[in-house]
């Protein structure tokens, strides 16, 4: 439900997603945009505006590498851009090759914060395999707009001491469930 | 649909606090008390062997030369071998051998949690009424969810600069999340390659299949947060994030995903 709300708020702007590739991939050197001229290991991807129901998973991936994105749909706007440099909207990158196979990442930005990350395209497992592997598929970490601790089940953070634990969010959650 | 019940148990061990959670029916949660106690006992047994803070532990005797690997608990040899493999895989960004002999402290917490929880907590999923089980030891956690159970864990990533607040969230059914950084204990992170403490504020979070993996790779990523991370390509991680003064960086399965604002189109 949240994603739909964010999508309605979304306006497309000149956000560029860069998916870093290891240098040995053949596609790499081909696209050296001025913006990232110092990054020979990166492929520039033009953002493709997407709505949650737009079927972004239809983007085809080639066996050897990324899908080529020829989208020119990015239009600049006066979107609010936070200090994080991210403009609001939903953006789909081209596929990246990972040990899971080719993955495609879609992010939703609201208020300059990544509020949702989906992987609309992922390895073409058989349905049985997909069921088994679904849980292990990579999911990017979304930044929160606000710390809604009521919805958090467990907290990961730099190791706290037993004393530090008492002031921690984890402590509050534990006490609520003791 | 009623909300599932949840029970939490906490225990102090390994210099921090461990939290064990069971999600399920009220009866199932109540029946999990013994398993939680067994998990804590198993962690304490491993701590007694591997704590460098205890003069009488086997690791302390080994480090003083009073005990050989051959005469020690065989798990010391297993851990030493595993630490060597991790050191090689991380290009020396994680090391248990760089200072004052063999010190596997950075490996043991995640590994011991995996061992104890796999033996005593995970089997609860076979019990009727149990939807999910999880354990968090000082901010490094592992969770399991019963197949088909309508549950997933919402994991918060602690904000390194705002204590008590969450910087990010992630949903996990089965897997581990570990965070390393300078936020809580000051500059206790040292780059083993140089011997120099990481002075910049950094928080590195890694999501992986198990906590042994997530923990050591979070440590490696924390000391290398500012580097080019092509070395992560083959890392056995699902996803990762670092937060530094310079901003947020992300990886999916070892591949860097960068978000950059365009200057013009």
Image (tube, coloured by chain):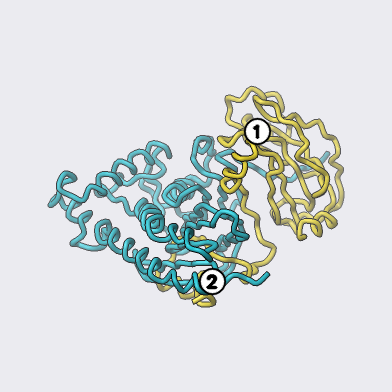
Chain colours: A yellow, B cyan
> Mark 1 sits on what residue?
A42
Write the residue at 86% across / 45% down.
A76
> Mark 2 sits on what residue?
B6
Residue furthest left in the image:
B66
Work out whether residue B100 or residue A50 is closer to the camera in this orientation and state it. Answer: A50
- Image mark 2: chain: B
Q: Secondary structure at mark 2?
A: strand
Q: Place residue B194 in its image quadrant.
A: top left
Few, some or many C-alpha atoms within 10 Å of disc 1 (few <14, some 14-19, many ≥20)? Answer: many
Q: Check the image and report above or below for B161 versus A43.
A: below
Write the residue at 60% across / 51% down.
B246
Work out whether residue A122 or residue A114 is closer to the camera in this orientation and state it. Answer: A122
Q: Are marks 2 and 1 in contact (CB under 8 Å)?
A: no
Counting from the top left corner in percent of width and height, residue B108 is at: 34, 53
Residues behind callouts 2 and 1 on a single chain: no
Q: Which mark, by number, is residue B157?
A: none
Counting from the top left corner in percent of width and height, residue B148 is at: 60, 55
Counting from the top left corner in percent of width and height, residue B245 is at: 58, 55
Query: Is residue B253 left or right of B41 when viewed as pictured?
Result: right
Write the residue at 72% across / 34% down.
A44
Choose mark 2 or mark 1, whichever is in front. 2
Q: Secondary structure at mark 1?
A: strand
Work out whether residue A45 or residue B76 is closer to the camera in this orientation and state it. Answer: B76
Work out whether residue B34 or residue B203 is closer to the camera in this orientation and state it. Answer: B34
In the rendered view of the protein, which quadrant contains the N terminus of chain B? bottom right
């Amino acid at each position: 439900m949240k994603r739909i709300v964010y999508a309605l708020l979304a306006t497309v702007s000149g956000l560029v997603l860069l998916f870093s590739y290891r240098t040995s991939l053949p596609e790499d050197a081909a696209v050296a945009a001025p913006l990232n001229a110092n990054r020979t290991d990166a492929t520039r991807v033009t953002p493709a505006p997407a709505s949650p129901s737009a079927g972004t998973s239809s983007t085809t991936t080639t066996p050897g590498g990324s899908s080529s994105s020829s989208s020119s749909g990015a239009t600049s706007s006066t979107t609010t851009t936070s200090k994080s440099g991210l403009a609001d909207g939903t953006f789909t990158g081209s596929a990246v090759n990972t040990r899971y196979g080719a993955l495609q990442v879609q992010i939703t930005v609201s208020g300059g914060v990544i509020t949702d990350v989906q992987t609309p395209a992922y390895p073409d497992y058989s349905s049985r395999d997909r069921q088994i592997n679904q849980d292990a598929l990579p999911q990017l970490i979304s930044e929160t707009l606000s710390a809604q601790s009521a919805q958090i089940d467990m907290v990961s953070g730099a190791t706290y001491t037993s004393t530090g634990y008492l002031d921690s969010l984890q402590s509050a959650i534990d006490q609520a469930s003791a | 649909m009623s909300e599932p019940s949840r029970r939490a148990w906490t225990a102090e061990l390994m210099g921090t606090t461990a939290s064990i959670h069971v999600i399920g029916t009220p009866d199932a949660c109540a029946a999990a008390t013994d398993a939680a106690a067994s998990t804590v006992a198993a962690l304490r047994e491993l701590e007694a062997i591997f704590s460098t803070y205890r003069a009488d532990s086997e690791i302390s005797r080994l480090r003083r030369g009073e005990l050989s690997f051959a005469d020690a608990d065989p798990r010391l040899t297993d851990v030493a071998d595993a630490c060597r493999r991790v050191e090689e895989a991380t290009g020396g960004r994680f090391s248990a051998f760089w200072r004052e002999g063999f010190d596997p402290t950075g490996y043991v917490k995640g590994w011991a949690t995996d061992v104890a929880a796999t033996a005593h907590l995970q089997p609860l999923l076979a019990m009727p009424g149990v939807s999910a089980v999880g354990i968090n030891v000082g901010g490094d956690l592992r969770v399991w969810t019963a197949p088909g159970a309508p549950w997933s864990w919402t994991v918060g990533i602690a904000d390194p600069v705002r204590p008590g607040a969450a910087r990010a969230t992630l949903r996990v059914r089965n897997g581990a999340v570990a965070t390393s950084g300078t936020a809580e204990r000051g500059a206790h992170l040292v780059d083993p390659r140089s011997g120099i403490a990481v002075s910049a504020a950094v928080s590195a979070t890694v999501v992986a299949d198990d906590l042994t993996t997530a923990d050591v790779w979070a440590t490696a990523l924390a000391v290398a947060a500012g580097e080019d991370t092509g070395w992560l390509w083959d890392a056995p991680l699902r996803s990762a994030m670092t937060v530094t003064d310079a901003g947020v960086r992300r990886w999916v399965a070892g591949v860097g995903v960068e978000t950059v604002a365009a200057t013009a189109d």
